[in-house]
């Protein structure tokens, strides 16, 4: 029976054989760009939510007075 380590090694070898070294570099570069864009989008959404939250808090405080 194969362990997780052996299975991962086999999968890596299969990917290299199927796609070739150059294609793997391109895929990795694309994944890096995707990750960067995803993080940027996530930060923008978090900033927008914080802005909305502050606006709601200010509106609530003004209603109380």
Image (spheres, rainbow, N blue to C red):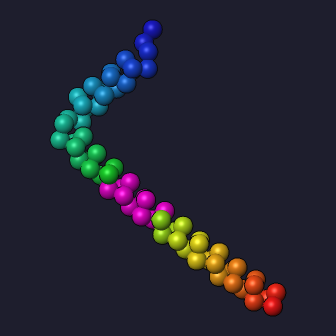
Identify the residue shown where x is 23% and y is 28%: 17
The correct choice, above or below, for 10 with respect to 60 in the image is above
Magenta stretch bounds: 33-42
The correct choice, above or below, for 20 with respect to 13 in the image is below
Identify the residue shown where x is 27% and y is 25%: 13
- The foreground one among 12 and 54 is 54
- The foreground one among 10 and 40 is 40
Left/right of residue 39 with respect to residue 17 in the rendered view: right
Identify the residue shown where x is 29% and y is 31%: 15
Residue 54, picture quadrant: bottom right
Question: Picture coordinates of residue 38 (x, y %)?
Answer: 43, 59
Left/right of residue 48 with respect to residue 7 in the rendered view: right
The correct choice, above or below, for 42 with respect to 47 in the image is above
Residue 25, picture quadrant: top left
Question: Picture coordinates of residue 3 (x, y %)?
Answer: 44, 15
Let me know if residue 60 is in the magenta part: no
Q: Quadrant of the N terminus?
A: top left
Question: Picture coordinates of residue 27 (x, y %)?
Answer: 28, 46
Identify the residue shown where x is 65% and y is 75%: 53
Question: Picture coordinates of residue 42 (x, y %)?
Answer: 49, 62
* Magenta stretch, overall SS: helix
Let me know if residue 41 is in the magenta part: yes
């Amino acid at each position: 029976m194969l362990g997780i380590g052996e299975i991962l090694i086999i999968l890596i070898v299969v990917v290299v054989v199927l796609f070739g070294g150059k294609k793997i570099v391109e895929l990795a570069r694309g994944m890096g760009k995707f990750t960067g864009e995803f993080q940027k989008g996530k930060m923008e959404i978090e900033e927008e939510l914080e802005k909305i939250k502050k606006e709601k808090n200010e509106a609530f405080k003004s209603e109380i007075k």
